[in-house]
Image: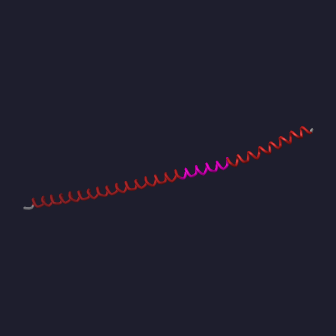
Amino acid sequence: MKKLLAIALIAASLTACNDGEKKEETSVTNDSLINDANKMADEAKMMADSANQKLADSTSKLVDTASKMIDKAGDKMKEAGDKMKDAADKMTDKAKEAVEKKKP
């Protein structure tokens, strides 16, 4: 009975000693996990910032391109209007000439 009690006491003390070591390993592991999580969060933030900057640059380029296209379209419309006015003036002049030729 004494031997059984001694074995149980030794087993309990070994189990208690091992539990203390596991707690230290767990805390070190938790610290490393926290550090890893912080690094990952920092990397994710840098990636998001980079993506936002690229999106802003792309949007700016798109707006600039659209603005240039609108300006070109406006210039083309002005040119077309000028050509129509010239054509109308020529038609008016020809009509006047035709009327004058018909007069006796």
Q: Nearer the viewer, residue 58 or 3?
A: 3
In which quadrant is the N terminus drawn?
Answer: top right
Name of the residue lying farthest toward the left: 104
Q: Position of residue 80 (x, y in %)?
A: 26, 56
Q: Quadrant of residue 95?
A: bottom left
State the image coordinates of residue 28 (x, y, percent, origin top left).
Answer: 68, 48
Looking at the rendering, which quadrant does residue 104 occupy? bottom left
Foreground residue among 55 and 40:
40
Is residue 46 shown in magenta? no
Tell me if residue 32 is in the magenta stretch.
yes
Mark count: 0
The residue under the point 18% across, 60% down is: 92
Write the start and end of the magenta stretch as one range: 29-45
Residue nearest the viewer, comparing 79 with 34? 34
Q: Nearer the viewer, residue 49 or 59?
A: 49
Query: Principal SS element in the magenta part?
Result: helix
Who's the residue at 70% across and 47% down the image? 26
Q: Position of residue 76 (x, y in %)?
A: 29, 55
Color style of the picture? secondary structure
Q: Which residue appears at 31% of the width and 58% of the height?
A: 74
Question: On screen, 9 above or below 96?
Answer: above
Q: Residue at x 49, y 52 (%)?
A: 50
